[in-house]
Amino acid sequence: MTTVLLVDDEKLILRSLEKTLLRAGFDVITAADCKSGSETFSQNAEVINIAVLDLNMPGFDGMPKTGAGLDLLADLKKQKDSLPVVILTAYDEVTKAKDAVSGGASAFFVKGREQGLVELIQKILQVAG
Amino acid sequence: MTNDIHRHATLLKAAARAAKNITTILDPYDLLQRTVDIICDEFGFYYAGVFFLDDAKQYAVLKAGRGEAGREMINAGHRLAVGGNSMIGASIANRQGRIALDVGAEAVFFENPHLPKTRSEMALPLVVGEDVIGALTVQSTEEAAFHDEDIAALQTMADQLAIAIQNSNLHRQAERRSRLLKAANRVGKEVTSILDLEKLLPQTVNIICESYGLYYAGVFLVDEAGEYAVLRAGYGKAGKAMVADGHKLKIGTDSMIGACIAMSEARIALDVGEERVHFKNPHLPHTRSEMALPLIYGGRVLGAVTIQSSEERAFSEDDITTLTTMAEHLAVAINNAHLIEELKDAHDEILRNKVFEALTTASTEAIHWIGNKTLPISLTVSRLREEIADGKVDLESLKEDLDMISESAAQIIQVKEQLIGAVREQRPRPILFADVVQTAAHQRDISSSMLKVKIDHAAAYVIADSTQLVRAVGNILQNAAEAGAKSIKITARETEERGILEIMVDDDGSGMDRDVMEKAWSPFFTTRGVDHHGLGLPAAMHVISQAQGRIAIVSEKDKGSTVAIYLPKGIVNDEPLKAGNVKNLLLIDDNDDWANHFSELLKNTNVKLTQTTDLKKLPVADLVLVDENITAIPLADVLTAIAKAGLISKTVILTSAINPERVTQFMHDGMKDVSVKPYSAGEVSELLK
């Protein structure tokens, strides 16, 4: 079974995405900010196959931060360099997308195309696999 | 012989009386005309006239003359050449009195058609020290009216007249100097207090012309290229016409203004008709003297003032000194106005950038926020469609999905209310601030034990729309409560600023650091997580601004925040209350500030007011008033009790913050009306009507 770590501070989005991923056959572990995302990963590093992180959410200090997802990306990569990570955002931002990729993200995904997200996760895992 | 002695004695006495009278006159405008009248009256002469030497000392010009003949000659510009063949001309040239006893036979007599009856004339020089300043003529209808010995007697009087003229001139000069200094002070004082150039310059020309009694004044400023002096303000119609025509003068030597600016020095033309550099201006045909003064600040010539008089040689040394001082004041004022304009431009530029930045930030935040709130809806709907298509609908999961859709929609509606609510129709009026606080606290579930409210008597009323102010105060109280405040202190007092009240909301919550505080006014910025929209403070600021007030926040991390609000003070008119047909009034409300105030307003009327929160037995009433925000008992219980007592159709729901949805609901329930709470006798009269 493939396990996805899903980190987003919008609880309704988190739950809705979780349900979509569950329905697609993934196991899902959720967290609501950078700090809990990092802790959740370190506690479940063995089982987590991929992380999907929101770009803008509370940072490690608990305060809202633009681009906090990139901080968590760096943290997770430090914990497990081979972990595939998808960054989620509400904006089409080329600069942020480049930052994400150069930070080691496998993909930068704009929210609103969730069916595409399921396919993207499957594709990334296939390549990594 | 005896007759001659008697006549001479009479003449001496008359001369003494005339001299005494003349020397008491200080008013220069009055002196000469009164002198000729006194002389004629005292001596019984047919005519007397006073001539002054012109500046060139070539002519004696008539300045005062007895009767109609005198007026006509003055109007005609009557003058006699010094040393010519007139009695006056000869007496001035020789500095001696002259007599013509039989004027018909006197060769030197000027045959004046205005004075046909003259048969004797005496001309006496007016001498002050070494200078002859003019001459006095006295004329009689009698032949041989004067003797040689009379010359000495009348010359004494003429000498007194000359001294009186000199005194009068000195007095006039002193008076003029004092007036000029006052005018210069006035100009200096008034112009330096005006900071708007468009007001400063027209006011300056008005002040100059009115204070100095001048024909015209205008202010030119150097254009950006430094090529032209452009007229920015001119006195009267001529000035306005020239400003409208875009009147400008090239900087250089072609005009007095141009030369004055080019050379950075004052230019004076005392007879402008003969002044080479004077601009022949068709708008100012009566100009006879002109002075151009440079406006210099910090070594830079900003422009020049033109000052024009319809009199020749109008400007004395005193004028030049005081007007130069005035020009210095004006240059400082213009420089200040320029600085203010530059500051304003810089401020506008910053504001434009800030507004753009704020709009961009707000729009981005708003898009992000709305996107995040709508996303669960589209996600859930899409997943449900798939589940339905697959025939795998789980009821528990479906219920959860519907809840998510509902919650997302509710958050979006809440934002709409914050955004649109603050710009709803405004009805500013004096409102009881204590009532606003109570309603806001009640609406936001803030416990009254948490609030410490201290409102000075003089700060009881503010001018605002009660619905909007309840919203703004509610947002602030909610922020404090969400910041974990245990206590919220609210004070209201008068400030030193006339008609402005200061309201402070202090909380002991978690406070904000500097970074968060700077973003606190940005829409959609929140530190309280995704369930908050971050519109509370921006909406409060909008409400306070619309009420002509201002709001500021000071906060310290872990110590708390203080929100300072400044609002116009409300004044409630002490008008009589008209109760209409209402005799028995039932008020269902807490014993709070508004209820006490309402009860006070009804004190001297025939209305019997019963206030209660006991619903067991409601008394009979013509009108029932219910406070929507009653705290002692639930509103629902009140409405049930009213319905049970059959009083629904007599009930008016009162609220500080009216809401269209709730109004519709109450009206559907059969209430007589829903209204904003009255705060003045006039508003209560309107309610009872």
Image: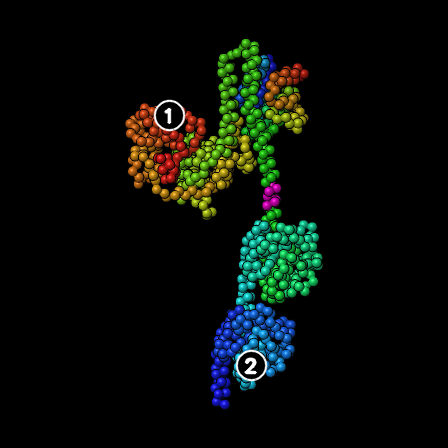
Q: Residue at x 41, y 34 (%)?
A: B676
Q: Is residue B57 magenta?
A: no
Secondary structure of the magenta portion, mostly?
A: helix
- Chain ID at mark 2: B
Which element is circle 2 on? strand
Closest to the observer, B435 or B49:
B49
Highlighted range, magenta: B344-350
User: Which residue corresponds to mark 2?
Assistant: B120
Dot 1 alpha-carbon crowd within 10 angstroms: few under 14, some 14 to 19, many 20 or more: some
Q: Is residue B394 above or below residue B323?
A: above
Q: Residue furthest top?
A: B391
The C terminus of chain B, quarter of image: top left
Q: Position of residue B18 (x, y in %)?
A: 49, 77
Q: Is residue B347 magenta?
A: yes
Q: Is residue B36 above or below residue B351?
A: below
Q: Earlier in the sequence, mark 2 or mark 1?
A: 2
Q: Position of residue B218 (x, y in %)?
A: 61, 56
Q: Nearer the viewer, mark 2 or mark 1?
A: 2
Q: Amino acid at mark 1?
A: Gly
Could you give the CA–CA distance between mark 2 and mark 1, rounded to whole angstroms?
A: 113 Å
Q: Quadrant of residue B326?
A: bottom right
Q: Position of residue B168 (x, y in %)?
A: 53, 72
Q: Amino acid at mark 2?
A: Ser
Closest to the observer, B99 or A102:
B99
User: Which residue corresponds to mark 1?
Assistant: B670
